[in-house]
Image (cartoon, rainbow, N blue to C red):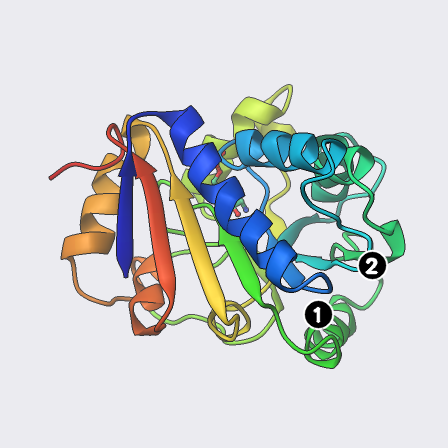
Amino acid sequence: MRVIVCENYDEVSKEAAKIVASEVILKPNAVLGLATGSTPVGMYKLLAEMNKNGEIDFKDVKSFNLDEYYPMSADNDQSYRYFMNENLFNHINIDINNTHVLNGLAKDPEKECADFDKMIDEAGGIDLQVLGIGQNGHIAFNEPDSFLYANTHITDLTESTINANARFFEKIEDVPTQALTMGIASILKAKRIIILATGSSKKEVINDLINGEISTNNPASMLKVHKDVILICDKEAYDK
Ligand code: GLP
């Protein structure tokens, strides 16, 4: 895993945006794997600016998002579909029909997940996957456990994740306790992966990611088996 340590959040956003932009320039019909959470917001802002300036074109780009709360309606302002529209899709020239976010109201969640994996395969697989990381090491919504799922699946959220994500909701009781999420193999199948981490709340987990062993108790550590992963973090998250 290559590690890029940046001065601050803005520099992390710039580094990440450069990599995503290069991917789209080199492959105009690139398939991007996208993440939510507060960390990639700065990167999305820069990508929108680059698109506006004519530096990058999203016309033929396809995207697949990592996860969605369950149950959750797409028009709920806490949904990840809403987040993506607000933070990126509404500001770039991507065809909204080429953006894929799991349906948080799917009647048959298992089928929704299997169809999602099939759609990714049919699109030729993900060229570049953007990831954030939870304070407990979760990537997408693959939570620390004694085992991990390979494919896209429905999962229960841990108390730690519910607490961490409560900041986006009015009250903690409003945070959904389940989600649909890409699995570890779905993520590892991406040709290239960048993982972003900023702020001191990520210090412990980033230290464990860099120096610790591969373990299902830190799902992000599974990234160590992938041949093309770049961790981009700020000084606060990187504790030598
Ligand atoms: C959520 C998402 C993850 C994301 C994580 C970190 O739980 N499911 O994909 O990486 O939050 O969020 P933040 O970037 O706000 O710390």
Task: Please say whether residue 181 is visible from this viewpoint.
Answer: no
Location of residue 208 in the rendering, given as x and y in whole percent from the top left corner: 20, 51
92 is higher (above) or lower (below) than 100:
above
Q: Earlier in the sequence, mark 2 or mark 1?
A: 2
Q: Amino acid at mark 2?
A: Asn
Location of residue 90 in the rendering, given as x and y in whole percent from the top left corner: 81, 35
Q: Classify residue 179 as left or right of residue 101.
A: left
Q: Which residue is denoted by mark 1 in the rendering?
A: 113
Q: Classify residue 229 as left or right of residue 79.
A: left
Locate residue 147: give its quadrant.
bottom left
Q: Residue at x 23, y 67 (%)?
A: 214
Location of residue 60 in the rendering, given as x and y in whole percent from the top left corner: 80, 60
Q: Amino acid at mark 1?
A: Cys
Query: Observer-nearest residue: 110 or 7?
Result: 7
Q: Residue at x 41, y 50 (%)?
A: 195
Query: Observer-nearest residue: 112 or 189?
Result: 189
Q: Quadrant of the C terminus?
A: top left
In the rendering, which numbered label is found on residue 98? 2
